[in-house]
Image (tube, rainbow, N blue to C red):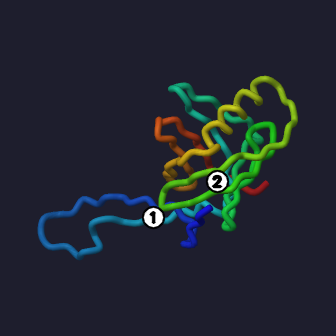
C-alpha cells in the first residue's frame, strides 16, 4: 500500500476575483489547509441515491497519521487502512465488530460502510465540516467532534 508521506491535509483552492491591472503572482488563489488526520469527525448524514439519511449519534471517524482509520459506523466499531493523496481519500477494506443493533442503525451502518469501503472519495473541507463524495455524487457529511 502506498502512503503519502506529505502532511495529511486536504487542500481547497478558493478563486479570488482580481481587479483590472497588474497583481502579484500569488493573488490568483488562496490555499486553505484543513487537517483531516488527528481529528475525530462526527458523521452527520449520508446522502445516497438522492436520499439523505441522518446518522446515529455514535457514528464517528478518525484518520490517523499512520495510514489507518477507525471509528463507529452507527452500531459497530471499524478500522481500515487509508490512503490520502491531495483531496482524495481512499479507505481499504473495513474490519468491523459484529454487534447487532436495531434495524435503523444497521441500515445506516451498511450504507456508510458501503460508501467508505474500497473507493476513492473526494474530501471537501469547509470551516470545521467535511464532505466525502463518491464518483457517483453520493456523500458523507461530517463535522469536527467537540470535546465532551
Q: Position of residue 148 (x, y in %)?
A: 79, 54
Quadrant in the rendering for residue 68: bottom right
- Residue 113: give its label: none
Mark 1 sits on what residue? 32
- Near mark 1 (Cα within 10 A), the count class, few <14, some 14-19 or many ≥20, is some
Left/right placement of residue 16 relative to residue 84 reads left
Residue found at x 68% / y 39%? 113
Name the quadrant of the N terminus: bottom right
Q: Residue furthest bottom?
A: 24
Q: Disc 2 and disc 1: Cα gap in Å?
A: 16 Å
Q: Which is nearer the N-term, disc 2 or disc 1?
A: 1
Q: Nearer the viewer, residue 14 or 119?
A: 119
Q: Residue at x 55, y 30 (%)?
A: 48
Residue 94 locus on image (x, y percent): 72, 46
83 up-or-down from 60: above or below: below
Residue that numbered label 2 is attached to:
144
- Mark 2: secondary structure: strand
* Camera-side residue of 120 and 22: 120
> Residue 63 at what x, y percent from top left?
67, 58
Q: Quadrant of residue 72?
A: top right
State if disc 1 and disc 2 touch (CB < 8 Å).
no
The answer to whether 11 appears left or right of 1 in the picture is left
Question: Which element type, helix, strand or loop, lies under badge 1?
Answer: strand
How many numbered markers are drawn?
2
Q: Is residue 19 above or below residue 54?
A: below
What residue is rendered at 64% in x and 36% in y? 114
The image position of residue 25, as x and y in percent, is 24, 75
Depth check: give the residue in front, 25 or 21: 25
Name the foreground residue: 72 vs 22.
72
x 59%, y 64%: residue? 2
- Answer with the quarter of the image where residue 77 lies: top right
Amino acid at each position: 500500500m502506498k502512503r503519502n508521506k506529505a502532511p495529511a491535509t486536504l487542500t481547497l483552492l478558493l478563486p479570488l476575483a482580481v481587479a483590472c491591472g497588474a497583481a502579484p503572482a500569488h493573488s490568483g488563489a488562496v490555499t486553505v489547509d484543513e487537517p483531516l488526520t488527528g481529528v475525530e469527525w462526527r458523521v452527520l448524514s449520508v446522502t445516497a441515491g438522492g436520499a439523505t439519511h441522518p446518522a446515529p449519534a455514535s457514528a464517528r471517524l478518525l484518520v490517523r497519521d499512520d495510514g489507518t482509520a477507525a471509528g463507529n459506523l452507527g452500531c459497530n466499531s471499524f478500522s481500515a487502512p487509508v490512503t490520502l493523496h491531495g483531496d482524495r481519500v481512499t479507505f481499504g477494506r473495513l474490519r468491523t465488530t459484529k454487534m447487532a443493533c436495531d434495524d435503523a442503525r444497521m441500515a445506516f451502518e451498511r450504507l456508510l460502510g458501503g460508501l467508505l469501503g474500497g473507493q476513492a472519495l473526494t474530501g471537501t473541507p469547509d470551516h470545521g465540516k467535511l464532505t466525502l463524495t463518491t464518483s457517483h455524487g453520493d456523500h458523507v457529511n461530517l463535522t469536527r467532534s467537540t470535546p465532551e
